Image (cartoon, rainbow, N blue to C red):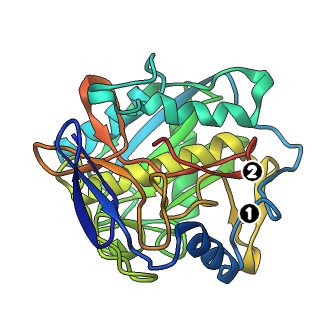
Amino acid sequence: MAVCCGGHSHIVSAFFGVVAISLLLLLPLPQAQAQAQAADPNAITKSNPLVSHGGQMLKGNINLALVFYGQFGRIQKNTLRSFLGSLNTNGRVGVGGAPQVSSWWRMLSSYNPTAGNVNVKVVKQYVDPQYSLGKIMTKDFIKIHVQKAVAEFPHAVTVIVAARDVTVDGLCMGKCAEHGVIDEAPYVIIGNPMTECPGACAWPFYKSDYGPAGDVLKPPSGDIGTDAMVISLASGLASVVTNPFSTGFFQLGQKASVIEASTACPGMFGSGASPGNTGKVLVDPINGGAYNVVGLKGKKFLVPALWNPKTTSCWTVI
């Protein structure tokens, strides 16, 4: 295992191999972050934090209905299923001393501390490889999938994963995951960004379309689209738990954009993150993939930073 962050790197020794320390900006890091936040009208800070609007948040045991819409490879489906199955694994430390996925997931319980841990379970899965509703996923088609998914489990959260050749209405236009409510049933939808918007939704595994040009990292699964979808899925789940009905934790940004638990901290994956720099992440010594958590059977993932309501600051798992 190695530790790295994006940018111009120099090498120092570490217990398991090589530690890459990034010095992307010439400014001291706190000063660089402060200047970046000041320049961003949507920046969430201690003086402009996410706040609770008093509405309901998801808590306790949450059932998920998982929908794969379109054609998917084995790596894609297995990786996403493994990530979901890793959210509630026991323990805090995984293979090689890396944090577990569940350590990241437990941060969301701090949004509603009196409710205990948030536990998720996939209770239903189905695949639609024939694109039964076409290759443009509109709100009306999302409604059909949600109604079908929750027919047996009325209180389940539907998670729709769209294939690479499916256009999802609303995605790739400033957001990489969408969540909403249909007939009082929350849902999350993500897509594979590699066809339409890899520069917006696949960083740090693909060159970003905007901001400082930080290092492009290798995906832990070996497939850029798959690991980009993991980041989007993690972000979408964090948002649907903390703001399922648009009355929970959020803040309004420019042009009525809604900033939530993970979108409050864009492009941050480890301590020391700054624009164009992921912060400290771990590197798989076998395939060079960048990750910050491990899940079931040592599966490696990169998950985004979350807003910490207790410290009113962005929090990373490492």
Q: Quadrant of the N terminus?
A: top left
* Residue 100 quadrant: top left
**Relative to 217, residue 54 above or below:** above
Is residue 253 positioned above or below 181 on the image?
below
Disc 2 marks which amino acid? Answer: Thr
Percent position of residue 232, x then y: 45, 54
Q: Is residue 168 visible?
A: yes
| Residue 202 as seen in the image, left or right of residue 130 | right
Residue at x 41% of width, y 61% of height: 278
Q: Give the x, y percent position of residue 316.
A: 52, 47
Task: Inspect the image, locate mark 1, and give the three-letter code of the amino acid beneath it.
Answer: Thr
Picture disc at residue 45: 1
Q: Relative to 69, say whether 59 is above or below.
A: above
Determine whether label 1 and label 2 are within 8 Å by CB.
yes
In the depicted view, which residue is nearer to us: 56 or 149?
Answer: 56
In this rendered view, identify the residue nearer to me: 248 or 98.
98
Image x and y of residue 288, in percent: 16, 51
Q: Secondary structure at mark 1?
A: loop
Q: Is residue 135 visible?
A: no
Distance of mark 1 from mark 2, alpha carbons?
A: 7 Å
In the picture of the structure, the residue carrying the numbered disc 2 is: 312
Number of marks: 2
